[in-house]
Every structure is written in structure tokens, then in C-alpha cells.
Image (cartoon, rainbow, N blue to C red):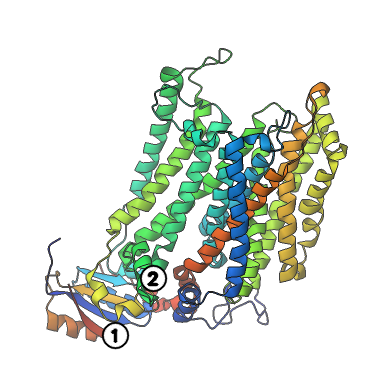
Amino acid sequence: MATTPVKPKDHEIDPATGEYRVIAPGQTFRSVTEKISHIVLTPQTPLGWFAIFGVGGALATMLLVALTWLFLVGVGIWGITQPVAWGFAIINFVWWIGIGHAGTLISAILLLFKQGWRNSINRFAEAMTIFAVVCAGMFPLIHIGRPWLGYWMLPYPNTMTMWPQFRSPLMWDVFAVSTYATISVVFWFIGMVPDFGTMRDRAESKAAQYFYGIASLGWRGSVRHWMRYETASLLLAGLATPLVLSVHTVISFDFAVAVLPGWHTTIFPPYFVAGAIYSGFAMVLTLAIPLRKFYHLEGLVTERHIDNMGKVMLATGFIVAYGYGMEVFMAWYSASHWEAFMMWNRMFGPMGWSYGVLIFCNIAFPLTTLWSRKLRTNIAFMFFISIVVNTGMWFERFVIVVTSLYRDFLPSSWGTYRATKWDYMIYVGTLGLFTALFLLFVRFLPMIPMSEIRMMLPGAKIEPKIKAAKAGD
Amino acid sequence: MPPREGTYGLLAEFDTPGDLVRAARQARQDGWRRMDCYTPYPVEEAAEAIGFHRNKVPLLTLIGGLMGLAAMFTLETWVSVLAYPLNIAGRPTYSWPAFIVPAYEWTILFAGLSAAFGMLALNGLPALYHPLFNAPNFRDGATTDKFFLCLEALDPKFDLLEARAYLESFQPLSVVEVEY
């Protein structure tokens, strides 16, 4: 491979190594450790934390109220009806789980591709995954109507001698989502074990020493442990990669296996996965930009991170655009009357406005502006665009669920869909729950992986002379 | 475990990973076997230097994955063919393509859990107590920015005075005795 000559003036290139810089210069093992662990170990909680946690907690309480009423009365309080029997619950389910996917992508796929820049953002991206899966997993469960019987979906010997139907995509979902949640939590926790060791050793209060001591499982940094740990991390990354692709594929099967126009299409798996990563990266930006500002982490989560995430969004955004284009093309090319009507109705029918929002938020606006490096490194703009894309991706799921269902084959069975206040309370409530959980994470757990950041520092370089010498056995 | 007394080993503290690797490699060449390095992040060269090349985590992961695959596929087949056959428009009960998705998920689930818990088990973790935590300089260094080499007392070559002199020859920041 030809090496491009490095411009010495480029401030992003480290003059000592000639490599791209992902974290700001002048950091040592100790300064990085102190900076990251101090956020957690300081006895002072910033007032802003309480303010945002208060808002998140209040919304989470509203979620609790709405769920209580839902459990007492039933799903009739929602806007779902015939023919739109899948409303907000399924939209929110797909939206949340898609958001989670970027966390796994950053922690697993970028690890396999040896993208060092991911090290600064992977921990909170994984936390985002887990909290998003918490919010997502709730929706199918409450949508089944009698959530206290949700365990009926699991294969276990019971007095009714009934077993699950393994040919149903809804059953596949149970296994895909539960595996995804489990592996994400395990990957996240294992990733934090060495950092818990650091926290244990740096904690001043007895309570914190006990807490992090137990969480660290007694980690002492033996190189034998580290080697097994590295192998396990790499294997978990290698396993999480096909897993994350399969999860959204399986979710798209929920739709694609049905015969409904607008759902019955082979483009769904890749297009769902790309959309998931697109919205997930937008959510990482939504979280990372305030966090780095608030906790002064600009030296660790640099403009280069923001820029790279913008590029990933640009690429996945185009895959999503291809998906939209292919849906329209197939509606025409299939020569199916129902497909063609569905597409016309989706664009120009009574709910055509939602298709307009989707095209503007996901395609027209981001895919024209993200080309500009100037805009990609403009932090305020990137925060704004992350909100726009998240909105757009929510509308994508709205369009898929509602505009396919409300006018299907028989005009006599056409209907409409209008969400009720309970739908909105539950949706906004999960946003609050997510915020509250995320703030707890930021306050009590190390949000940037210290051990992985240490590996990227210049001090971690071993002189080539020592490196080259072979072990004498 | 019965309480033990005496010396666990001698702990030399270094400032850079390079110094640690050089010392560890020399110690291995000089015939030391019961030793370990402690670093704040994975230092592959140090593991090579003390002769730790391979580990069993991949094997455990493979076994776990195959078990998950077999368990789920068998369960699905048994449920769909024998325990609770559903006749839906005369379609075959052994519809294996549909069984692939849950079996695939369980392959990953079992493999992932085996990788994570297998790694912990091979490492002997959780182990909330370890003699090294008694070393006064371990706490502020081993998980932050210092690199340690520990020659353990169980090594047949170990003699407190000689081992200390040997470690001092590498010019470490300090050499301390670690008690059980």
C-alpha cells in the first residue's frame, strides 16, 4: 500500500510518531486515570446532574404511572385498534433497540477493525446499548396484554404441556433480544472489571472501596490475567458482531415474514441494520457532546471522534437511503397493485406528512450537510443533527408500522391510527428512564475505559530494541 | 484455604513497560519460573517474556458455542416434532430452517458466557484477597501507572537475600517483600 506523505503542519498528526492523534497530547497514565476516576470518586455531585436526574426521574415516574394504569385496565387505553394493532409499542421497541446497536458496533466491530479511536467512547456507548435494550425490551412485554404471563414465551416444562412455536419470528425475537441483552451486559461488565480495580485502589471512602472492590472481583492486573482477558474481549467482540447484525435482522423478520404490502420485502434486514446503526450513532452523539462539555473531556473525546461518527452516519445514511429507494422501486417493479397503492398512500395519503418528515430528517438534511468537514467538526451542529436523525428514525418506524397497516387489501377494513396520551406518556417515560439510568452510570461507573486509554498513550510504547529481542526459551 | 505465613514473594516496581519486559525476560532466561508481572493495561511483551503464550479461553468458547447450538436445536426439534407438534396447513413439523435463528442465538449466548466466565475461572477470579494487596506500593501503582515484577517464594531458586539482590540489579524503583 502506498503511503501518502504526511503534511507536517497538520495539527492532528503526532510529530513524534507520525500517526493520527485521537486523544489530546500531554496526557500520562496518571493524569488520565485521575481525570476519569475523579468524576466518579469525587464526593461532590454537580448541581446540573441533580437537575437532569430530576427531570429524567420525574419522567420515569410518569412511566410508572402509565404502566400501572396499563396493567390495571389493559392495552385498550392505547391508540391501537383494528387494523393498526401495532402502534407505539412496536415503533418504540424497534427505535430503542436500533439505538442500542451503535453501542455494540462501537465496542465490538470497531474493536475487530482495530479502530483505536473507539476506546474513548466505547464504554458509554455500551451503557447506552444496555439502557436502550432495557427500554426496548419492555415494549413487547407490555404489548402482549398480560405482561405477567410473559414467561409463557420461554420454553419450559409446564402443567399445560404447551410449548412455544419456534417457527414464529416473534419467538425468534425472544431469543435474539434476550441473548443481545445478556451478552451486552456481560461484555460491558467484563470490560469494566480492570477499571473497577483502579477505582478500588483510588477510592477514599470505605463504602466505595467495598463497592468497587467487590465489583472488581479482585482484579490485580497480572499479565496472565490480562492475556486471557484480551482473548475473551476479542472473542466477545467477535461474537457480538454477528449477534448485533442478527438482532435487527430478526426484528425485521417480524415485518418481512408477514404478507402485508410495505412489510413483505427482502430489503428489510440490511436496511433495518443500517438504520439501527445510523440512529445509534446519532444517539451516541446526543450523549457524547453534552458529556464531554460538562465533564471537560474534550481531550479524550476529541473533534476527531465527532468527525468520525459523522462519517459513519453519512455511510449508513446512504444505505438507509438506498433502502427507501429500493422500496419505491419495488413498489413499481413488482407490478403489484397493492404494493403500488401502499407506496402512493404512504407518500400522499392522509399520513403522507410522516413520510415527508422521514425523508427530510434522514435523507435530505443529514446526507447533504454531513459531507462538509467543517460542519462535521462543528459541535453544535452535530448535536442538532443527531436530534434530527433520531427524530427521523423514529418516524421511519412509524411509517413502516402505521402506514403499512392502516390501509391494506380491503378498503372496507381501512382505518386510521391516533396515539392516546398513554402512548405518549409511556414513550416519553422511557426517554426519562433512559436518562435517569444513564446519569446513574455516569455518576457511579467509569464512563471512559481507563485501561484502554492507557494503551493509546505514548508511555505505553516499548522501545523497539526491547520489543525485537526474543524471549530466551 | 488454611492461613499461610511467611513470604509470598519479592515485588520489584518499574516505571516503564520496557524496563519491566527487560527484567522479566532476563529472569526467565536465568531460570526463574514462578513469577508474574502486574501492569495497569495489557502488556503482551511481558506475557511473552515470562513464557505465557497461549490460553484456553478460545477452546472453552468453542465448546460453549457448540453446546448452545446443540441444546437449542435439539430442544426445538423435540418440541416441534414430538412434544407439541402443530399441524398448520399440513406443513412439515421438522421445519429446520426456522429453527436456525434461535439455535444461532444460543450458540452466541453460550459461547459468549463461556468466554466471559471461562476467562474469570481460568484467572481464579473472583478472589477478593491476594497477598499482593499487602504490598504498600501496589495499591497506588499497579492499577494506575506502575509496572511490577514479582518473583514468588515458591520458586526453587528463591532465596530472600539473593532474589532481592538479583532484582536490585535491574534498577527498579523499589523492591519490597510481600507477606501472605
- The residue where tag 1 is placed is B172
Residue appearing at x 52%, y 34% in the figure: B101
Image-quadrant location for residue B167: bottom left
Image-quadrant location for residue B160: bottom left
Q: Residue A208, which numbered label?
A: 2
Residue appearing at x 53%, y 57% in the figure: A126
| A56 sits left or right of B163 in the view | right
Number of residues whose C-alpha sits closer than 10 Å to that of mark 1, classed few (under 14), some (14–19) or many (20 or more) = many
Q: Nearer the viewer, residue A446 or A113?
A: A446
Which quadrant holds the C terminus of chain B?
Answer: bottom left
Image-quadrant location for residue A336: top right
Give the total number of marks visible in the rendering: 2
Which quadrant holds the N terminus of chain B?
Answer: bottom left
Q: Position of residue A30 (x, y in %)?
A: 44, 80
Residue appearing at x 72%, y 65% in the figure: A382
| A392 sits left or right of B96 in the view | right
